[in-house]
Image: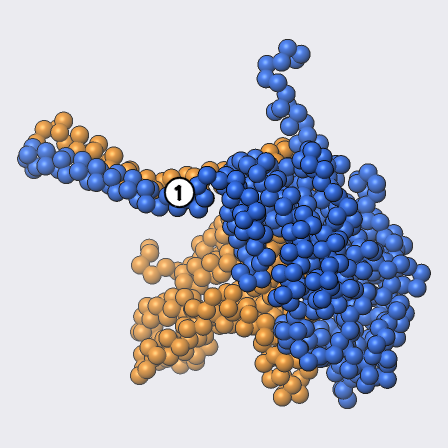
Amino acid sequence: MSRHASGRFERQENRLGYLFAAPWLVGFFGFTLIPVVLSVYYSFCRYDVLRPPMYIGLENYRYLLTESGNFWKSVWNTFYFTALRVPLVIVGSLLLASLVSKPMKGIGIARTIYYMPSIVSGVALSVIWLWMYNPSHGLINQGLALLGVPGPPWLESPEWSKEAIVLMGIWSIGGGRMIIFIAGLNAIPRHLYESAELDGAGWWHRLVHITIPQLGGVLFLLTIVEIVTCFQVFTEAYLMTRGGPENSTLFYNLELYFKAFQDYDMGVASAMAWMLFVATLAVTVVLFQTVGRRIHYEGRN
Amino acid sequence: MTSSDGAIRSVLSRLTLGVGAGLTLALFAFVRPPSTGVEGRTNVRLWRVTGAEAEEAPSWEWFGEAQDDIHVQKIGLPFLEIEQKFLTAEVGGVPPDAFEYFGSVAQWSTRGALMPLDGFMERDGFDRDSVFPALWDEMMWNGRTYAIPVGTATEAFYWNKEHFRRAGLDPERPPQTWEELREYALLLTTRDAAGEIDQAGYVPGYWSPNATPIFLNWAVQKGAVFLNAEGTEVDLTSDACVEALEWEANLFGELGRDALIRKRASFGYGSQHGFLGGRLSMIVQKSSFVQEIEKFAPDMEYGVSMIPPPADGRPGVTAGPAWIGIPSGAKHPEEAWAYLKFVTSTETQLRVAEFAADRNLAAFFPANVEAANSPQQQSLPHMDVFTKSMEFAAPSTVVPLAHTVFWREYGNAWDRAMRGSMTPRESLELAEREVQRALDDQIEYNRFYAEYLRERDAPAGGGAR
């Protein structure tokens, strides 16, 4: 076969390839890349979609950082939420995973049952928990009353509303995280435990000196994913509290949503979106540079 | 691989291409939206919020029967999507010809999304007095009219007569002043042994998570003016505003703040609603609440009156319109105007009243004074109170340029004061700052937009540069 012909085929194949990928390419450029790039520009503008953007330099950023009460409130709320929820969910998933990681009869069914709640959509979940948190008829406060403990008004109280939304997280500890932990736990060589046991190590020492170091990579990955997810918390607050009471559940993305789709203040909303992106990136980079370097990966020199 | 292989592949790939292109074209031919127009008539697309079919007075069909030139194609959109759909259609240059909606007109008129109607109105001698005067304010921007009210809803005071009787009050006499409302609220509130509220007399701000609609009424009754005449200065810290909030906050405290919050949180929707479930004696609610009472508590003995004013104030209430306008860039504005004229005419509004009376509908009542006062409309329960209220009504959009920010911040101010985390004055000061800033931004943006329009519309290549 001649060189010339082969070149032609390649070109033709390339053309075909691009042609078949065209719908995706159009979507990627038209609906993702261009809007993302434009949003950088809009973050320096006053822009409400209906009128042309008005360039105002760093004004949106200045307003958010120095003037807006809601912005810092939402930053604090989101930070608080993340700090409470990440440990709860990671430790919870790990405990659950170690409970169902051992091979025994019916374990598949047990895993399925623990996995099931995580299939429930965020919307349905919020509605169910709204009922559970009802201060007088809710399951939680009625249960507490049986124990003689007066329950707080949960979502109706600025002191308890964030904790209430964090607690909802236990609903999903049996989801994808548990599965990844099970895989991680099963990958730890048995002989490590056996020799530790011979040396007389109890469960605590085995956990601290074997399980956690061996799970390092998995733990690290899940923690980062969880932090990023927490930064984006939205559905629960949007459906259950609309940011109240007293803005105690006004999370970052909720404030962003209000700015964008209630006030049509796309400039401020774009600025907020980019700051969230930078913050997420910064947290991830810092974690990789500090914690990430100390992690032991199996099979790496 | 041989060259004959190559030739076959080349043919194959061309074939694939051809078939692919053909299929794509065929697909486009088939998915082209079916024409819904009527031959020989101009098609006017009307967007409005989807309603239950049986509850929509089909004015567009009546219009179709009344003349032969225009077909109005009604397109219903879900409430949660209509604003964003309208926004995108407007920006994309394919707006509907007519837009019927409720809520703030200013949100669209001030941003150039609606067409001024004054030219049409003057030409055809539109009778402004046919509509409740309180509704026009919201239709106006910069001295021009951008929409016409088709319906309205207002608020009123509801009380449970059985509760009144049990407390030894005259069931036919609602409280006449704020002071009486306070006394009745304390009297009607009963508690269990643990101090929890059993039956609530009145729960300030209760009906929705945002208390703004109710709170606005009290301030309006005190004579609050939220914006200066030039529309540049927000005033949420006037004595009227502060005193209204203080009154509500004091009452909240007197009834027992924590117990009240717990009680309010236990209320839900439908039969779980405080008033409908018979666990709350008095409430300020929308005019459409009558319908909910009939649906969820048909046996309840209840009364409706105007909202009691303060002893030193005046009767007052806010009213929000349902309106219809013509989007900027509409393809058939003249034909859309013909429909607007038809829907807002006294004849059509009377027909709407009749339609509502036959079906016992009360979501909105006609914006047309004659239709609202017609025997048909007045045959609906308590309509007399609502039409009477319209004489004292103030618009529910008080800061047109920053309506959504005002609505949210005012609600936040209320929330802080009720919970006692700030004094009413401090809380209102905070809200005022936020709303003022939003207003300043919008004023600046408007100036920029006006300049932009001047440059865009200036004759191209004009000599005077």
Quick one: which chain is orange? A
Give the image quarter of residue B448. top right
Q: Is residue A99 visible?
A: yes
Q: Quadrant of the N terminus of chain B?
A: top left
Left or right position of B252 against B14: right
Residue beneath the point at 61% across and 49% down: B100
Left or right position of A293 against B322: left
Q: Percent from the top left, x then y, of residue B69? A: 52, 40
Q: Percent from the top left, x then y, of residue B457? A: 62, 24
Residue beneath the point at 39% across and 46% down: B34
Residue at the right extreme, as displayed: B312
Residue beneath the point at 40% across and 60% down: A217
| Residue placed under numbered mark 1 in the picture | A27
Residue B37 vertical placement versus A229 (above, below): above
Which hue is chain B drawn in? blue
Q: Is residue B110 visible?
A: no
Q: Secondary structure at mark 1?
A: helix
Q: Percent from the top left, x then y, of residue B31? A: 35, 46
